[in-house]
Image: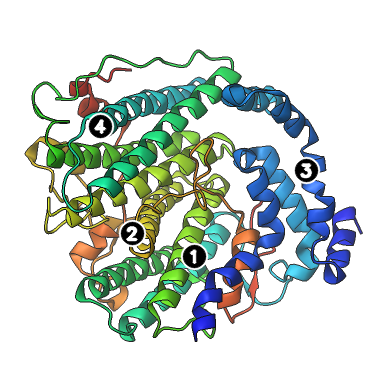
């Protein structure tokens, strides 16, 4: 169990490492369109083996619908995680932390349900999650996973914003991403004071948060989602 | 089969192939060679020049430049606020040392946002706006902004939450702009991290017993003077849907309001920061 909690962030890091390693090295360029194009190219090259662009599995769809379904998938994952945390709190959790986790649980449920309702008949079905690698009885394991999910969510919304064509949906994504960033900062603070925006997530030169493409995000989140996802129709520009 | 597919195949037997070959570095050769030649101090300018080079065919519109200048004006103000706060605020209590370190981190971020936006604007051939002379009392509303620690943190929170709302309000102007929108979003979420941290600092220091890292209702834990900063945050309606108890869930009105941060229009932001001497 000790190892499980230690390894949790490692798992998340490693699953995205192919793309991430070079991203970190040129972090101050990561927001550029040229960078995004490079990522898209690499992702396209990788597609055969990455799974998310194969044409079977749950199809997220195209254009704004695809991006909303992508966000809906991430919110399903986050909500499922915090529902579990709130239902089976880790050992010796204090009242304040439990209250915070219940807050976050309902935030993620609100996000999930908003996307479900907004998508209507275009919504993907409920996804099956795989939390086998998370030790819900361990504070360290739960906090490390929460931190990874929140930082991932921030980078996902940041990276997908420009793909949206509807100002309404962009506005909604903007309303959500800052709440995810608040969660991320808070979780980081209770893990380690003053880590709210350290260089793991905010680059030292320009003080910019991370952006990730949908394929990068799904490569990381996929470790926790059992349902096969087909992201082959998502917009890339 | 292209080169990357080949690399992908190699990767199956050599997990480090990307590190060894680093094809993206090759693809980004021009950018890196620029980056290597310039001194660290001129990096922001180089970034701007790279933007200009890469996007010379699509210079930013006046509306986009307007958003960038607006953001820079706010960042100048925030940056100046934290420079003084770090030096002058009377950090006290159990967390005084850590709190001062946190304000130093935020101060550096705001200074870097200033440099970044200056670089982007310069690179686009525009003259970045310059700092103003600020009135950190907001016309006497906060007479002891730096002398009184709870006041300092309350004003810091108000500014961060305003910044989050300001970037959010400007985002639609940048729609579909892969470079400018993404850069703005990457600043926006950093401001939200700051806001959450400051709020948590106020809770731990006992400056508020009800405050959370997120905004509940139109939560006015910083006093009536900041009411405009939180006006509208209490909404439970999103995209025409009532989030309270949405689809039979247990989402309360408080949670519904916390779940979504609301934008402010540039006009609303201008009215909020004008008493501090921020003009555009």
**What residue sits right under mark 4 in the picture?**
B85
Kindly tell me whether residue B175 is visible in this rendering.
Answer: no
What whole-number distance in Å separates the C-alpha atoms at marks 2 and 1?
Answer: 12 Å
SS at mark 2? helix
Question: Going 32% across and 83% down the picture, which residue do you hit?
Answer: A89
Distance, label 1 to label 4, CA atoms, is 32 Å
Q: Secondary structure at mark 1?
A: helix
Q: Nearer the viewer, residue B59 or A25?
A: A25
Chain of the residue that carries numbered disc 4 in the rendered image: B
How crowded is the residue under tag 4: few (<14 C-alpha within 10 Å), some, or many (20+)? Answer: many
Residue A55's spot in the image, x, y percent?
A: 73, 71
Q: Which mark is residue A148?
A: 1
Circle nearer the viewer, 4 or 2: 4
Left or right? Give the position of B38 relative to B126: right
CA–CA distance in space, label 3 to label 1:
27 Å
Same chain for the residues under marks 2 and 1 in the image: yes
Ranked by sequence position, the earlier of labels 2 and 1 is 1
Left or right relative to B51: residue A182: left
What distance separates the C-alpha of mark 4 from that of mark 2? Answer: 22 Å
Q: Position of residue A80 (x, y in %)?
A: 42, 78
The residue indicated by pointer 2 is A186
SS of the residue under disc 4: helix
Q: Quadrant of the N terminus of chain B?
A: bottom right
Structural distance between the alpha carbons of marks 3 and 4: 41 Å
Q: Which residue is mark 3?
A: B25
């Amino acid at each position: 169990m000790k190892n499980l909690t230690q390894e949790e962030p490692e798992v998340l890091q490693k699953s995205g490492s192919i793309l991430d390693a070079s991203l970190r090295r040129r972090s101050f360029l990561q927001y550029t369109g040229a960078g995004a194009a490079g990522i898209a190219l690499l992702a396209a090259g990788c597609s055969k083996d990455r799974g998310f662009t194969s044409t079977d599995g749950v199809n997220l769809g195209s254009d704004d619908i695809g991006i909303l379904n992508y966000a809906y998938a991430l919110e399903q994952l986050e909500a499922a995680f915090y529902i579990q945390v709130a239902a089976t709190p880790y050992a010796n959790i204090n009242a304040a932390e439990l209250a915070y986790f219940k807050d976050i649980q309902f935030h993620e449920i609100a996000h999930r349900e908003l996307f479900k309702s907004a998508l209507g008949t275009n919504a993907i079905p409920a996804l099956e999650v795989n939390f086998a690698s998370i030790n819900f009885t361990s504070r360290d394991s739960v906090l490390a996973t929460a931190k990874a999910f929140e930082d991932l969510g921030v980078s996902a919304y940041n990276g997908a914003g420009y793909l949206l064509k509807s100002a309404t949906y962009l506005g909604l994504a903007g309303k959500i991403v800052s709440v995810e960033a608040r969660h991320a900062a808070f979780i980081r603070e209770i893990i380690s004071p003053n880590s709210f925006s350290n260089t793991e997530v905010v680059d030292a030169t320009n003080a910019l948060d991370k952006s990730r493409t949908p394929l990068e995000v799904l490569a990381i989140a996929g470790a926790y989602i059992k349902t096969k996802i087909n992201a082959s129709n998502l917009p890339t520009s | 089969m292209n080169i990357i597919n080949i690399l992908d195949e190699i990767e199956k037997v050599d997990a480090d192939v990307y590190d060894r070959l680093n094809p993206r570095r090759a693809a980004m050769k021009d950018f890196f060679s620029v980056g290597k030649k310039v001194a660290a101090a001129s990096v922001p300018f180089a970034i701007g020049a790279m933007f200009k080079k890469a996007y010379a065919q699509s210079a930013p519109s006046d509306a986009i430049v307007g958003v960038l200048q607006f953001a820079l004006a706010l960042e100048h103000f925030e940056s100046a606020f934290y420079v003084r706060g770090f030096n002058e605020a009377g950090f006290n209590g159990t967390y005084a040392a850590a709190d001062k370190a946190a304000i130093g981190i935020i101060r550096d971020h705001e200074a870097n946002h200033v440099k970044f936006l200056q670089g982007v604007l310069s690179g686009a051939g525009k003259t970045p706006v310059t700092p103003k002379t600020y009135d950190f009392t907001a016309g006497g509303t906060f007479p002891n902004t730096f002398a009184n620690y709870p006041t300092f943190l309350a004003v810091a929170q108000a500014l961060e939450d305003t910044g989050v709302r300001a970037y959010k309000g400007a985002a639609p102007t940048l729609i579909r702009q892969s470079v400018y929108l993404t850069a703005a979003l990457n600043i926006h979420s950093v401001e939200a991290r700051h806001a959450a941290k400051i709020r948590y600092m106020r809770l731990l220091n006992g400056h508020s017993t009800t405050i959370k890292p997120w905004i509940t209702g139109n939560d006015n834990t910083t006093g009536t003077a900041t009411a405009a900063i939180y006006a509208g945050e209490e909404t439970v309606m999103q995209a025409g849907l009532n989030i309270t108890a949405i689809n039979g869930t247990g989402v309360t009105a408080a949670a519904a309001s916390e779940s979504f941060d609301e934008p402010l229009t540039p006009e609303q932001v201008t009215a909020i920061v004008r008493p501090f001497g921020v003009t555009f």
